[in-house]
Structure formats: structure tokens, C-alpha cells
């Protein structure tokens, strides 16, 4: 057999193998799904899940095909693992009994399903109040003190209660800076809302005590020179709000006033 004939036979064999092997993945159907979409972290006992405006809102997921396209008509199933909620075929979730840990809910499409996600079953909120403790920031140097976190405010605690003083868990409290210290360079942010690790985060969800909390983090290297030097003080004002059925909970919004000054040097 000549070399040319041998090459032709090998080429034909490779074509045959290629025709028999499917080297790609699935070509149709559900390839992936999103996480479970919750309109709210909680549902009120005796009511159904609602969005931030108070409209009934079912749970949902998004299914994707082999090319990353959304499959809006794909059937979705919903299952709850706990009796504290009930879920309809269309994803409408009903609060049955109070559940501070959160009822586990799963959604699926095709052969895929989401991990269990918890939904708090809570009471309707009737009041929102703020902590009355003093909330000054007294920084100790012209550069941030990362050891003692002196450029952080204490926690700005908002407490949400329901009828009879019951803790209203699972409500989102939104914080925003509405006034901050003068900047050395105009337009430069000098303070932001953060969590207990100083990560920028403007919202918190009320816990089993009905409490939410965020801090003001001072960007002291950006504030005006005379404030950093301690020749004058300044102020941060923060607004905090919580809504239910699209309206402010009584007592919301509220303001926290945080004086900012350089701590006097220790003699």
C-alpha cells in the first residue's frame, strides 16, 4: 500500500469516528437555572408574599438553554420542606405560622433544582424606633486607625416591632448619608454606610429581635484639613427607613446625627 493510500484510509477512519462521537454537551432543554428569586426576605403570617410596594408577588427562578438564552415558558416546580408556609403551583407563598429560623423552599426546572432557601414568617410591623445612645466618631489620628476602628461610628440600630411589641423580623432597613463632613477636595466622599467589617453596605434585615444596624465609616483622609487637625468639628447625618406594603412604617424615616471630631491627644 502506498503512503498516499495509507493517508487516505486514516483520514476516512477519522471522519467515521467523528461522525459517531458527540463531543458537545446537551443541545436543548434546561442547562442551568438561577437562584430562587424572593420578592421579600419574609412573609407575614396569615398573608401571602408581597413585593416592596405591597403587591402579591410569587417566587420565581430563571431557566437557561444551551446558548445561555432564557426559557420563559419552561415549567417550574416549587416545594417547601416546612409546614410553616404553603406554596402554590405558581410560586405564591403563604405564611402559616411564625418561623424565626425560616421555612425552606426549593424550586426546580428540567432536571435541576435550587438549594433550599429560607423565608422568614413574621408579624406585620407597626412601629420603627432608633437607638438613643450617643453616636459620635472621635478619630485619633490624621490617618485611619485600623486597630481601634476610631473612624467608625457605633451601630445605628433601628428596631421594628409589631402588635403587642412583638419583634418584626425579616424587614429591610435602608440607610443613606444625607450630610457628610466637608471634603478637602470638593466632591470627594468623606463618609459611607458600612457593615461591621466596614464593607460598604447600605441595607440590613431585621433579626429575631426586630433589629437592624449599620455604621458610618469616616474616610478621614478625605475630610477637610482643619477637621483632621482638630481645629473644628463636623457632622454626619444619616437617614434610615423601613417600609411595609409600600408605605413607611410609623416612626420611619428617622435620622441619626453623628458628630465628627479629632480626639484630643492624651497628655
Image (cartoon, helix red, strand yellow):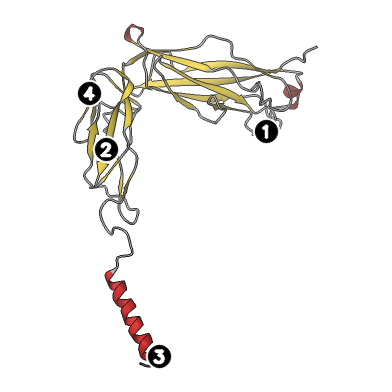
| Residue 142 position by quadrant | top right
> Which residue bears the numbered disc 3?
3
Between disc 1 and disc 4, the foreground one is 4
Question: At which x and y percent is residue 204?
Answer: 45, 24
> Which residue bears the numbered disc 2?
107
Q: CA distance from mark 4 to mark 2?
A: 16 Å
> Which residue bears the numbered disc 4?
83
Q: Residue at x 25, y 53 (%)?
A: 29
In terms of sequence position, does the residue under pointer 4 or pointer 3 come before the other?
3
Foreground of the two, 117 or 16: 16
Q: Residue furthest right?
A: 267
Q: Are marks 2 and 3 in contact (CB under 8 Å)?
A: no
Q: Are marks 1 and 4 in contact (CB under 8 Å)?
A: no
Dot 4, how many residues are within 10 Å of its Cα: few (below 14), some (14-19), or many (20+)? few
Q: Residue furthest front?
A: 1
Q: Residue at x 19, y 32 (%)?
A: 88
Quadrant where the C terminus is found in the figure: top right
> Which residue bears the numbered disc 1?
186
Q: CA distance from mark 2 to mark 3?
A: 60 Å
Amino acid at each position: 500500500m502506498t503512503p498516499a493510500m495509507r493517508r487516505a484510509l486514516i483520514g476516512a477512519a477519522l471522519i467515521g469516528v467523528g461522525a459517531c462521537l458527540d463531543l458537545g454537551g446537551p443541545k436543548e432543554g434546561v442547562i442551568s437555572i438561577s437562584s430562587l428569586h424572593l420578592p421579600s426576605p419574609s412573609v407575614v403570617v396569615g398573608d401571602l408574599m408581597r413585593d416592596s410596594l405591597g403587591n402579591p408577588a410569587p417566587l420565581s427562578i430563571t431557566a437557561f438553554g444551551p446558548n445561555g438564552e432564557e426559557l420563559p415558558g419552561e415549567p417550574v416546580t416549587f416545594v417547601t420542606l416546612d409546614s410553616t408556609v404553603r406554596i402554590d403551583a405558581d410560586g405564591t407563598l403563604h405564611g402559616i405560622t411564625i418561623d424565626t429560623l425560616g421555612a425552606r423552599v426549593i424550586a426546580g426546572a428540567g432536571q435541576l433544582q435550587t438549594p433550599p432557601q429560607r423565608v422568614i414568617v413574621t408579624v406585620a410591623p407597626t412601629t420603627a424606633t432608633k437607638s438613643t445612645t450617643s453616636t459620635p466618631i472621635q478619630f485619633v489620628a490624621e490617618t485611619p486607625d485600623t486597630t481601634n476602628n476610631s473612624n467608625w461610628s457605633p451601630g445605628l440600630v433601628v428596631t421594628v416591632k409589631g402588635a403587642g411589641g412583638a419583634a418584626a423580623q425579616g424587614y429591610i432597613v435602608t440607610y443613606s448619608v444625607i450630610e457628610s463632613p466637608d471634603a478637602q477636595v470638593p466632591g470627594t466622599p468623606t463618609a459611607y454606610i458600612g457593615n461591621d467589617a466596614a464593607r460598604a453596605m447600605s441595607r440590613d434585615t431585621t433579626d429575631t429581635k426586630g433589629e437592624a444596624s449599620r455604621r458610618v465609616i469616616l474616610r478621614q483622609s478625605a475630610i477637610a484639613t482643619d477637621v483632621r487637625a482638630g481645629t473644628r468639628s463636623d457632622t454626619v447625618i444619616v437617614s434610615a427607613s423601613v417600609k411595609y406594603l409600600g408605605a413607611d412604617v410609623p416612626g420611619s424615616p428617622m435620622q441619626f446625627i453623628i458628630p465628627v471630631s479629632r480626639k484630643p491627644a492624651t497628655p
